Amino acid sequence: MRQYEEESSYDLLEEEAAGWIVTFSDLVTLLLVFFVLMFSISTMNLNKFKYAIKSIQLNLGEERPAVDLLEIIEETEEPGEKTFTLEDIAGIKTKEQRIMDDINDIIDETQLGDHVVITRSDGKIMLRIRGAVLFDSGSAILNPDSSSILDQIVKIINDYPDYTINIKGHTDDIPIRTEKFPSNWELSSIRATNVLKYMIRSGIDPIRLTATGYAELLPLVENVSAENRSINRRVEFVLEKKKSGF
């Protein structure tokens, strides 16, 4: 009898010890449902979402919803359906989008919209500035006027310390052969390095910065005209979030 009681107590303890697994499974299931719901909302069509919300409100007994969805989300004036993200509903912006907005403010303030382009891809933000904005032809010395935009870029970089910056120099395909610049490699590299030095003098941590020269190897457009060559002569700032260490 005593042995039977000991075995029963042991079985009971095993059942109690395994009870956490059920609770944990329920928690994981709830989290999965939550993320599926968030994804569904983030990709849902606006009109369908409005219809669903109103249906829920009416089923809860509201003859006319007190707050219409139109008061929360502005309708586009153009006909047709509008898609939106969870970011639009909650008013939450990702850090990447905030950086993009800050840079666009700089472009508007400096009125350099024709010479500055910003793009975002694969978690990286690229700010592309035509070489003529920063340098004279055949020179790697920064123009006095270049500080107006570089100082603004420095401010943004300081505002987002968890991003690294790779500064890339590019030229067109016209060869250069001077005592100071034997080729476009030297010109593009020294231009990128001089921009990097400006950033360091302005207080940016050097460990966040790299500078690379690509000469004429990565043209944006074919070098078949003066305008195209002007586009290819550029300096790029590539902002990328630091990799987490382990």
Image (cartoon, helix red, strand yellow):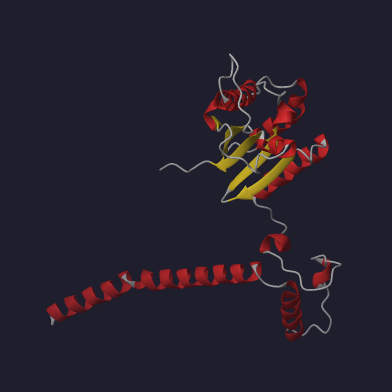
From the top left corner, tell me how far across and down residue 156 is, in percent: 68, 36
Residue at the extreme right of the image, as rendered: 77
Please name the residue shown 71% across and 35% down the image: 230
Question: In the figure, 144 relative to 22: above or below?
Answer: above
Q: Quadrant of the N terminus?
A: bottom left
In the rendered image, which quarter is residue 106 located in? top right
In the rendered view, tell whether residue 149 sits above or below residue 245: above
Seen in the image, is 50 located left or right of residue 210? right
Single out the residue that lies furthest toward the front.
224
Q: Is residue 210 visible?
A: no
Is 186 left, or right, of 12 in this rendering? right
Report the front residue among 129 and 2: 129
Q: Residue at x 74, y 26 (%)?
A: 146
Determine the residue positioned at 78% across, 41% down. 105
Instruction: Indicate the quadrant containing the C terminus: top left, top right, bottom left or bottom right.
Output: top left
Quadrant of res 77: bottom right
Depth check, front residue: 220 or 205: 220
Establish if 84 lies above or below 56: above
State the image quarter where residue 195 is shown.
Answer: top right
Q: Residue 136's spot in the image, x, y percent?
A: 72, 23
The image shows residue 190 at horizontal and vertical percentages of 59, 23
Looking at the picture, tell me which residue is in the foreground, 141 or 187.
187
User: Percent from the top left, x then y, of residue 88?
Assistant: 72, 61
- Residue at screen point 57% across, 31% down: 215
